[in-house]
Every structure is written in C-alpha cells, then in structure tokens.
Image (spheres, rainbow, N blue to C red):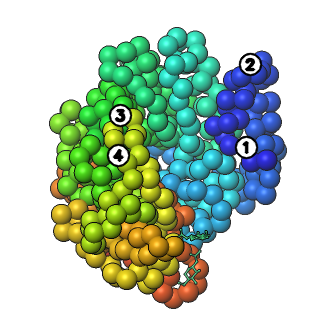
Amino acid sequence: MRWSLALAQVVAERMRWSLALAQVVAVLVMWIGGASGVFPINVCPCSKRSLCQPLPAKLQFQVQVLVFDHGGTDYQHYDWSKITAVVLGDRFSKEILCAAHEHNARVIMRGTTMPQGFVNHHRRQIWINRNLGFVKTLHMDGIYLEMRDIIKSGTMDQESLTLLINETAKAFHSEIGGSQIIIDVPWSPHCRDDRCYDYAAIGSSCDFLVVMSFDMQSQMWDECFAKANAPYDHTYTGLSAYINLGIDSGKLVMGVPWYGYDYPCKHFFEPGRCKLEPVPFRGAPCSSEVAKKIPYKDIMQELPKSFTGRYWDDNYKSPFFVYKANNTYHEVWYDDPESISLKSTIMKKLKLGGIGVWFGTDLNYSFNPTAAMQTEDMWNALCPIRKKWRVGTI
Ligand SMILES: *[C@@H]1O[C@H](CO)[C@@H](O)[C@H](O)[C@H]1NC(C)=O
Ligand SMILES: *[C@@H]1O[C@H](CO)[C@@H](O)[C@H](O)[C@H]1NC(C)=O
Ligand SMILES: *[C@@H]1O[C@H](CO)[C@@H](O)[C@H](O)[C@H]1NC(C)=O
C-alpha cells in the first residue's frame, strides 16, 4: 500500500491521535518507508550530517527555479545546476533530500489544505504544528500548499485560508530560518475554476505564489475545440493581473508545463480545428477534462506517428500535431523548448521571482542520444539567455 504524506495527515487527524508528534512522525515514516524511506527519527539518512541541515536563510538566489517531482529515480538526472528548490510528490524521499541539499537546493514538502476545517484558530494551530513537525523532523526547507478547493469570495473560508497562510508563514520562518512557504494559485486571479482567494493578502504573507500558467482550458465558454494548454498571451495577462492586484512581482513564480493534452476529436475538420465532445466543468459547458494529459517524453514518441508533423500555432504560440488511432483523430497540444523559452522571457519582462516546472519527471532521461538532446533542450528553455540562474547572493 502506498501512503501519501497528505493521506497520512488526514488519517492522523481522523483518528484524533493524542500521541506526541514524534510518534506520529515515526508511524508516518514507516508508512512512507517502502523502498526509499525508512530511517530512524533524528538520524541523518544522508552521507554527511551537514546534508540534513535546512539551507541557511542567507543562501538566496536571484531567480527561483522550482521543480515539481513525481517520484522515481529521475531526480538523479536532473540538471541540478539550475534548480533552487524541489517540491516533493506524494512521498517523502530521503534520496532526493540528500541530493538536493548536496546541490544547494531546498526541499519542499507538499501539503494540502482543508479550508472548511480552518475557521477556528485552534484547528489551524494543530495543522500548522503537525506540518512544521514533519518538515523539521525530515530535515526539509519549507512547505508548498496546493489549493484546489472551491472558495467563494467574501466567505469565512476565504478569510480563514488567509489567516492559515499568515500563521503558517510566521511559525515556519521563526522555527526554520531559510524556510519557504509556497502557495499555488490559478493562472489568473479572476476566480478561475471557482477558486477565489484573497490573493493580495496571501501574497503578502507567503514567500512565493506559483502561478499555474497551464491547464487553461479547464473551462471553455465559447467554442468547444481542442486548444493549447498554456497560450503565451494568457500566461502574460494572467501574471500581469496578479501584479495589478498589488502583489510584488518578485514573489510570483511562473509555472510551466512539461506535459500536454491529447484530445480525441468528435469531428476533425482540419489541423487546429478538432471539435470536442462537450464535457462540463464547474459550470462551463466544455472542458479539457475530455482530453488525456501526457508527459513530454510520451509526446515525443507520438510525434513521429502523426500525419501532420509538428505544427506551430502563432496565436497561442504553442505546437500541436494530429494523429489517427482506432478511426479517431487525436489532436495533441503541448509545450516544447520553443514555446517554453518564449514564456521564459516573460520572467524578465514582468520582473518575476522565477519559474517552476510540472513535472521534472516528464522528460526522458534515458541514454538514447535523441532523447538526451530533447531533454537537455527542455532544461535549457528555462533560461533562454544561456546563463546559469543559480547565481547565489550569499
Ligand atoms: C499577518 O496578520 C497580522 C495580523 O492581522 C498582520 O499584522 C501581519 O502583517 C500579517 N503578516 C503578514 C506577513 O502579512
Ligand atoms: C485503440 O484500441 C485498442 C484496443 O481497444 C486500445 O488498446 C488502444 O489503447 C487504442 N488506442 C488509442 C490511441 O486510443
Ligand atoms: C526514451 O526515448 C527513447 C528513444 O526515443 C525510447 O526508445 C524510449 O522508449 C523512451 N523512454 C521513455 C520512458 O519514454
């Protein structure tokens, strides 16, 4: 059975354990153990004791490069010279902890929020103490909060979420000097997917807001056609809208996808005109929910099988192609080094704090020379001016 950090937290909460935190963590570590986890509490699992120290507050980077990991051993092949922090997936990994610290990159735990439970101060404190305990015991450098909940404007939920983040930041910063509190937010602040948070207030408390500049077709209100996952213009206007709310642009991190969408066409007219079966999502009549998300490494395997080859849509500034399988046409929209390096230039234009990629594990890290080149190009697209980001200001 594969237990996730988040699940373990929920279970612990449900059972209302009154055990000391260390015991909870001991159980947690057993759960998340399996192939990669088990080590006794308070014993450093890395080769050097120093690798179990969170990175110091004075170690700061001019630009953040966050990589979202999704498990497995791909991390061994990451371009660590570019990474400033890695956000763990569902499972804690001592191997990633040691590798990241060895490369002066922070390790961030993924947490989830349950806003309905946070209306009172006491519940928030329990949640904060538990998460802070996990992060400290497992030698990590911060927490990333993934918020997927529907929150309406002006409600108690909205207010308690703001308080939760304010209090979390306070507790983490005082206990772990260089720690980072990172919050994810939708590509645009205008209540996308019914996620209405008080972004300005959240932005003033946390270290970074990661704007998820992708999955932009979850709600299609007009035509029901296959479209780009992360159009350039939407990326730009979405990020600008956060800045217009008064959020310091240096706290904004632009999230870019290393995956795309494979849309089955209900009617295929011509490349770029793939009509979809309407699947509603949160009130919108049509959605990318009808498509399958596929990692870049699989897209690169599919591309040679397409009858169109790679097309470029100049409106979305994204590539796509069409293939046919089982008598159905499929249109695949994705991002590649060209579309990502175009988006990377937005970082400079808007003076953003950095860039984040979903997921580090979406590339092909085999020794095949073609795959290796495709993978290297994707890493390089994160910094188009061919200069290493990681100029530390120590
Ligand atoms: C957190 O909330 C307190 C009290 O409302 C406020 O004074 C403080 O500025 C907030 N902290 C941040 C970092 O926004
Ligand atoms: C085509 O159909 C076969 C058999 O039903 C299935 O295994 C395969 O995944 C389908 N291919 C695509 C691309 O949908
Ligand atoms: C990586 O690329 C090589 C060459 O294109 C291919 O043979 C292999 O199946 C790919 N591996 C993955 C995991 O996609």
- Write the residue at 53% across / 50% down: 87
Identify the element where label 2 is drawn. Answer: loop
First along the sequence among labels 2 and 1? 1
Dot 1 amino acid type: Trp
Image label count: 4
> Real-space Cα distance between discs 1 and 4?
34 Å
Residue plotted at (50% across, 54% down):
68
- Earlier-in-chain disc, 1 versus 4: 1
> Where does the image place residue 311, in percent across and percent down from the top left?
28, 76
What amino acid does circle 4 point to? Cys
Measured Cα–Cα span from mark 4 to mark 3 = 9 Å
In space, the residues marked 4 and 2 are separated at their CA atoms by: 41 Å
Decide if residue 8 is on the left or right side of residue 358. right
SS under mark 4: loop
Residue 16: which disc? 2
Q: Earlier in the sequence, mark 4 or mark 2?
A: 2
| Residue located beneath label 4 in the image | 286
Q: Amino acid at mark 3?
A: Gly
